[in-house]
Image (cartoon, grey):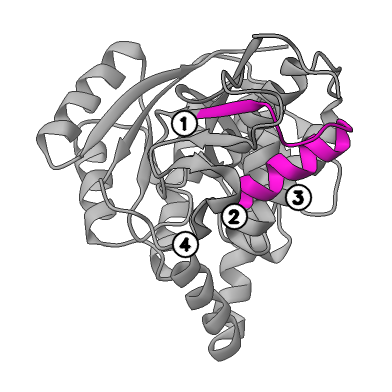
Amino acid sequence: MHHPKNRQATANAPGKLILIGEHSVVHGTPAIAIPFPLVQAMSTIQTSNVGTNEPVKIQCKFYVGPLKAAPPELRGIERCIYETVNVLKKEPKGFDIVLESTIPVGRGLGSSAAVAVALVKSLFAYFDEKLSQETLLKLVHLSETYAHGKPSGIDMEAIVFERPIWFQKGETTELLKVAVPISLVIADTGRVGDTFEAVQSIANKKQTNPTITRSSFEWIQTLVHKVKEALEIGDNRLLGFAMNEAQKELAMLGVSDEGLQSLIDTSLDRGAIGAKLTGGGRGGCIIVLTRDKEHAKQIAITLKNNGAYETWSYQLDQNV
């Protein structure tokens, strides 16, 4: 088997944010997601200094050692590595993998998908093979299925495309136009969001209160269309309105909580145009729409002083 001699390849992938449509996207309605490059996952593949027959070793925050002895929480990554190597017609020998990430885990920022994207890209780069978007998505989906059971696919697509996307399960993903720069603040509660519990609670609500849940999903779907329009024409007021309305629905559906709402209320009290949770809820992060970069910086500081574990001010720039 040919192995690159003393080679090293590194690849990065950004985090992601759901602008609107989380939870309802699981039930087949559209959602809009954007890349979040202020947090990144990085994968480095390097030739093993022990020998070309040495089994793959992996190093990350949770574990250091042979891949085959990796703990259950790395099962998705493990499957992704073996499947990628298989697609490359190589053997899982003779190289080591170092995974690093500044994406907080379990906060709805796409941590597992970003790690998988960076990993697949770095393996293809290490073996000097071209990687198509289709192959990348297929391999990352495999990893995400192990990590999340039945992922909608929105995380990996927002990360792979690195552009704002209109996503609907089973439909072709559409890249969205952003007419004017959008100044955002992302605030992390510091608490891991319980996505499984949140998704389960909505599934239960669908059973016990089908009429209310259906009308809520329908209104969120209308709001997703409003956000698309707002992005395309550069209407931040419309965007803020849709975000605020979506938050009301998410709170009513039981996936928000006091910690998230407190940060949202603080943002709105400081003049934010819109604010809502992003991702699974019940912990995790909020996303705040501000007037401009300066306003975003001020709100980021205020939120940090009012209980946020971490904050980022981020400008989503326009594209064509």
First of labels 4, 3 by sequence position:
3
Q: Is label 2 in a helix, a strand or a loop?
A: helix
Q: Are the residues tagged 3 and 1 within 8 Å (C-beta)? A: no
Q: Give the residue pinned by disc 2.
A: 75
- Residue 9's disc is none
Residue at screen point 86% across, 30% down: 88
Q: Provide residue 105's location: percent of width, then percent of height.
A: 41, 44
Disc 1 designates what residue?
237
The part of the image, by quadrant, that contains residue 209 is: bottom right
Name the amino acid type tagged 2.
Answer: Arg
Going from N to C along the chain, the mark reached first, 3 or 2, is: 2
Mark nearer the viewer, 3 or 1: 3
- Is 249 drawn above or below residue 263 in the view shown? below
Q: For the magenta stretch, what is the residue range?
A: 76-98
Residue 32 coordinates in the image, percent (x, y): 63, 40
Name the residue carrying label 4: 195
